[in-house]
Amino acid sequence: MRDAVIVSTARTPLTKAGRGSFNNTLAPTLGSFSVKAAVERAGLEGGEIDDVVFGAAMQQGSQTMNVARLIALRSGLPVTVPGMSIDRQCSSGLMTIATAAKQIIVDRQDICVAGGIESISKVSGSGKAFIETDAELIAMHKDTYMPMIGTAEVVAKRYNISREYQDEYSLQSQQRTAAAQAAGKYDDEIVACNATMAVMNKETKEVSFHDVVADKDECNRADTTLEGLASLKPVMGEGHTITAGNASQLADGSSACVVMEAKVAEKRGLQPLGRYVGMAVAGTEPDEMGIGPVFAIPKLLERFELKMDDIGLWELNEAFAVQVLYCRDKLGIPNELLNVNGGSISIGHPFGMTGARCVGHALIEGKRRGVKYAVVTMCIGGGQGAAGLFEVF
């Protein structure tokens, strides 16, 4: 029986989309930062890698043309190393790890690099992103293209989740991230990156470029207060509840890990971070995509004959506080085991990258806590949920 284990992980800092350190960094370069670090940490020669599997949610601009292959080449890997890009929206980074693991278990590959990226700065916005809607699809499922913030408002109203409840959770996320940063709990994941940042003069609109070193997450607001959160206006206007404070922050970043067959890792003298056990996905109505994990998690646990109490650590992507709260309360996830060092509300959410970041963090934090199993889960645009199960070493 072949097993797939994660032997290294590395990620960039998460920087603010549009105005952070990576706002001028193209996707192949952004992805290469984490790939080169993960490969180096695993002690690999580039030519030993069987495949590079990378996920991105917006495969446009510099993130198109099979971005995984572009990242592999930009990372200095030999041209003989192939690449495959995956898009399952916000679970793309998790999906790549699952896919790499399956290639190792089923296709008898030995070493894969898997990860995720999102360069929101270079893709999102006028002239950079293009979506053509299908009228016949809308006639069948009218909410297929509903913006994510709209789906969050639906969940808030449909399940009676108050603005105050959302803000309280968001404060917790900020506080947990601030404490984790102060304790250095993200340091083992992050690789320092040299970048050229674009800065616009607010008065003249002239753009200048500055060399910077990104070596820590930039999105967290450690001084957040409940009063400050309460003062923010809802994005969709009066009568709504989603604000910039209780939603994930748009960010740029990449994360990568080396997935290896367990016996190969043993022969190399490597100590794996953990083992890929399995993954489940589920569909739900597009207008309430945020509740997807409540359908994916039971599937996952049932397939592997586990109960909620068997899971020692949960990473549930904080797309919006409202959907985290619904999923947490509906499933009975203990708050003290959920997003223990904060999440996307405070750290930031590069869509295709987050799943891979969460896996790396869950394995590192899980080892610190001595847990056996960790679950990484998230909602997915279009009405889906995903959940991945990992054994922590």
Image (cartoon, helix red, strand yellow):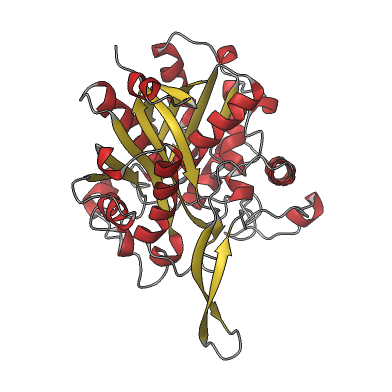
Residue 291 position, x and y percent, is 49, 34
Number of marks in picture: 0
Residue 299 visible: yes
| Quadrant placement of the N terminus | top left
Identified at 37% across, 28% down, the residue is 281
User: Residue at the location (43% across, 25% down)?
Assistant: 296
Outermost top residue: 305
On the question of residue 141 being in view, the answer is no
Task: Give coordinates of residue 28: x percent, y percent.
Answer: 34, 59
**At 49% from the left edge and 47% from the top edge, which residue is drawn?**
11
134 relative position to 246: left or right: left
Residue placed most toward the observer, 167 or 348? 348
Q: In this view, does 274 lie to the left or right of 219?
A: left
Residue 119: x %, y % from top left? 42, 59
Which of the 4 quarters of the picture holds residue 135? Answer: bottom left
Residue 168 occupies which quadrant of the picture? Answer: top right
Nearer to me, 364 or 267: 267
The residue at the point 38 percent across, 24 percent down is: 265
The correct choice, above or below, for 201 with respect to 36 in the image is below
Q: Where is residue 330 in the image (x, y as percent from the top left)?
A: 58, 24
Position of 48 relative to 296 (above/below): below
Left or right: where does residue 130 sit relative to residue 360? left
